[in-house]
Amino acid sequence: MGTVEILSRQVRGSDMGDIKGFLKVERQTAKCRPVCVRIKDFGEVGVIPKAAHSQEQASRCMDCGTPFCHWGCPIGNYIPEWNDMVFRGRWVEAFRLLTATNNFPEITGRICPAPCEYSCVLGINDDAVTIRENELAIIERAFKEGIVKPNPVKRRTGKKVAVVGSGPAGLAAADQLNQAGHKIVVFEKDDKIGGILRYGIPDFKLEKWILDRRLKILEKEGIEFITAINVGRDYPISKLRNQFDAVCLTCGSRQPRDLTIEGRNLSGIHFAMDYLVQANRRAAGEHTAIDNLIDAKGKKVVVIGAGDTGADCIGVAHRQGASCVAQIEIMPKPAACRSGEYAWPRYPLILKTSTSHEEGGTREWSVLAKKFIGENGQVKKIACARVKLEKDAGGCPLMRELPGTGFEIEADLAILALGFLCPERKGLIEKLKVQLDSRGNVKADENHMTSVQGIFAAGDMRRGQSLIVWAIAEGRGAAYNIDKYLMGVSNLPAF
Ligand SMILES: Cc1cc2nc3c(=O)[nH]c(=O)nc-3n(C[C@H](O)[C@H](O)[C@H](O)COP(=O)(O)OP(=O)(O)OC[C@H]3O[C@@H](n4cnc5c(N)ncnc54)[C@H](O)[C@@H]3O)c2cc1C
Ligand code: SF4
């Protein structure tokens, strides 16, 4: 039995937490910087909670017996156990428990949408425990106290694994496989490591030094990072197969959904990721060609699509000095709280107000964008109509345009944040000839192996566009199966 399991059993064997903590303490989330201040820069919006605050909040975890939060967390974090350690001020043990299941808690602790909290038993008739913030408090304290240190691997297996793609799935797989003793090379086509963590998620959600701090540790532990190499184009597949004993594909799912309506070819209409990548590069002081510049300064910005990516675009547009920002969405406004359709402990589809929404702008639902209207080749307005979600004879969802509801929105910058379809097929996927599933993602069996022997897949590339915590879970799962494939057995956790 490992140290962490012993620690976890010890905790569960004792009286956990303050048994009446949830009756005495109300949920209180940590503060964010005031809107009027944070809007002027790209610095992180959230503020790390103070120790006393986290200890008090952790006392609300009530040792419910069957911790559904643990089920709700895709990596199965030992939530009640580390909440108890936080409550008792045993931060080092909390850190050990946390990092037994999560490679990058400093990232999930900041920007995980915390499905665990929607499964918290306390959430049935009260406010859930502040699980995500407690997680952040543990890991940031551990960094501050110098407990998070490189742990170079003592014995190498002589096996080599290539990880293609350096987002959270690739980094989690690399970390796990390196700890198992294999030589790991991570290939990345961008000029810096991190995937969407680096070039999608804005700094006001995740400052990039947080990523760099972790990357330094991974490098010191022996992982080799090779950037600006597009595997399949700059690095031949034959070499990949000859030089490595196994390959883990973690290339993400970046093919954006388009809006092919009249006027789509006008200038001033961009995919969200094109906008966000540039914004992140500019925030990092990287060069952006002036003729390709997408900037919201002084512009009327319309973001089409109400997901998280759209919310990130709103935050960037405000910081760039947009004159106004509107977000429109074809789907109806979600309910403010759970309905029977999303009964506890399921992750519900409910109205979410991000920190970017708090900073201004308008939001409208049940709006269909019908046509981009331009002047001199530049978008100026979007013709819209209101729609109603109905079902067709076969029960499939159907959007019915409501007659007489047409209207126009002024827009000199339109951002398409309509989600992602699948991974890019050109290059690597085509050349490797791996099979795809019905949605166009890379097909892999229950062991993460693709249709090609020795080639594994994980993260968005396999699941479709998802969450960081799912990417970590996928990377860990793939690592376990690759280790088993190479060695016959694996001591890594199965996910
Ligand atoms: C704008 C935006 C904001 C988001 N915000 C959140 C959030 O707040 N919280 C959350 O939980 N989730 C969020 N997500 C989702 C989350 O970021 C993704 O689910 C996650 O990054 C997927 O990780 P991944 O490792 O599978 O892929 P990615 O992060 O997409 O990384 C894939 C990497 O592979 C590289 N690559 C591709 N092909 C090749 C090749 N041939 N050779 C070499 N390298 C290659 C790419 O350049 C990229 O760096 C967000 C997504 C977006 C788009
Ligand atoms: S990783 Fe996400 S789901 Fe898991 S405990 Fe942390 S906040 Fe909750």
Image (spheres, rainbow, N blue to C red):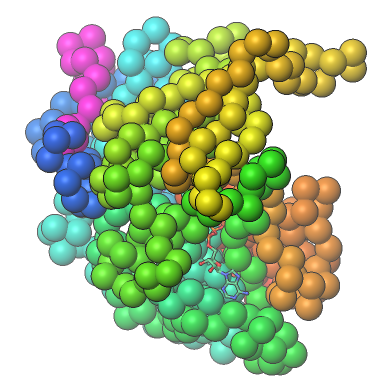
Task: Answer with the quarter of the image where residue 482 lies.
Answer: bottom right
* Drawn side of residue 248 relative to residue 166, left or right: right
Residue 16 sits inside the magenta stretch: yes
Q: Main secondary structure of the magenta part?
A: loop
Residue displayed at 9% across by 33% down = 52
Residue extending furthest toward the front: 376
Residue displayed at 44% across by 55% down = 275
Residue displayed at 63% across by 81% down = 231
Q: Is residue 93 above or below residue 488?
A: above
In the foreground, 170 or 144: 170
Q: Is residue 373 above or below residue 266?
A: above
Q: Position of residue 421 (x, y in %)?
A: 68, 49
Residue 303 sits inside the magenta stretch: no
Q: Is residue 308 above or below residue 104?
A: above
Residue extending furthest toward the right: 393
Q: Is residue 228 above or below residue 364?
A: below
Residue extent of the magenta highlight = 12-33
* Drawn side of residue 95 relative to residue 225, left or right: left
Q: Position of residue 95 (x, y in %)?
A: 27, 50
